[in-house]
Image (cartoon, grey):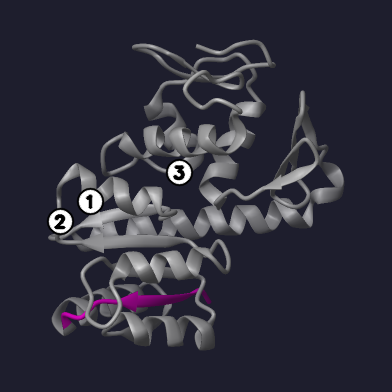
Amino acid sequence: MYKVLVVDDEKPISDIIKFNLVKEGYEVVTAADGKEALDLYKSENPDLVLLDQMLPEIEGIEVLRQIRAKDKTPVIMVTAKDSEIDKVIGLEMGADDYITKPFSNRELVARVKANLRNRHTQGQNDDNATNQDDIQLGNLVIHTKTYMVTKDGVDVELTHREFELLAYMAQHIGQVMNRENLLRQVWGYDYFGDVRAVDVTVRRLREKIEDVPSHPVWLGTRRGVGYYLSSGKQAN
């Protein structure tokens, strides 16, 4: 049984989220502020966190930052803010997904299932690691056994989503893929939000794997079409 930590200072919202997730078979623990969220995160070791952005004591973005400093537990930001900048900030900080209030119960459950399914798939990949080969692209090595990437022998810290996107594109070298396709293949479902998540994740990847992110060698853009991973020549 998966355990979900729900963090929201509005008890009616927290209660309805818990009701719907318990009905789907999840174990749910709840926190009403950022400090309690971090305490429960440490003690309960949840499989996924639903995290409100506006919280007392410690804001959601800071809670996310502290979670990301420890591990790659899937985090879905839940926010009443609907501006693009608020969504981007959460994604830039390492959130796996976001959902904007008000949301439907069906959408919420679908997002939780999809993110947990991706986490389960990662576990299966780790179990089957002996059947997988590392992928080398010049000075970049994608270590499929450990979900790590090295550049010139030095570890490059990626979030789970960043690694999944890079590994998927590495399996399709030179193939230009549109953002909708990447959302389906990497995020694991028909994304309810906009495709901005792909753009943000690509930008984060470039900042981590490229020597000069504004002139990428690996992760290129075909304007008006999508993104591709190069074999090492200058990407556009």
Which residue position is annotated with label 3? 187
How far is disc 1 from disc 2 in space, using C-alphas? 7 Å
User: What element does badge 1 sit on?
Assistant: helix
* Rendered image quadrant of residue 136: top right
Q: Residue at x 43, y 81 (%)?
A: 38
Residue 12, quarter of picture: bottom left
| Among the two numbered marks 1 and 2 on one chain, the one whose residue lies closer to the N terminus | 2
Q: Position of residue 78 (x, y in %)?
A: 26, 63
- Judge from the rendering whether residue 218 lies leftward or rightward of residue 91; answer left or right: right
Q: Magenta stretch?
A: 1-10
The percent position of residue 77, horizontal first and vertical second, equals 31, 61
* Label 2 sits on residue: 81
Mark identifier at residue 210: none
Marks 1 and 3: in contact by CB < 8 Å?
no
Quick one: label 3 or label 2, which is nearer the N terminus? Answer: 2
Residue 62 covered by magenta stretch: no
Foreground tag (3 vs 1): 1
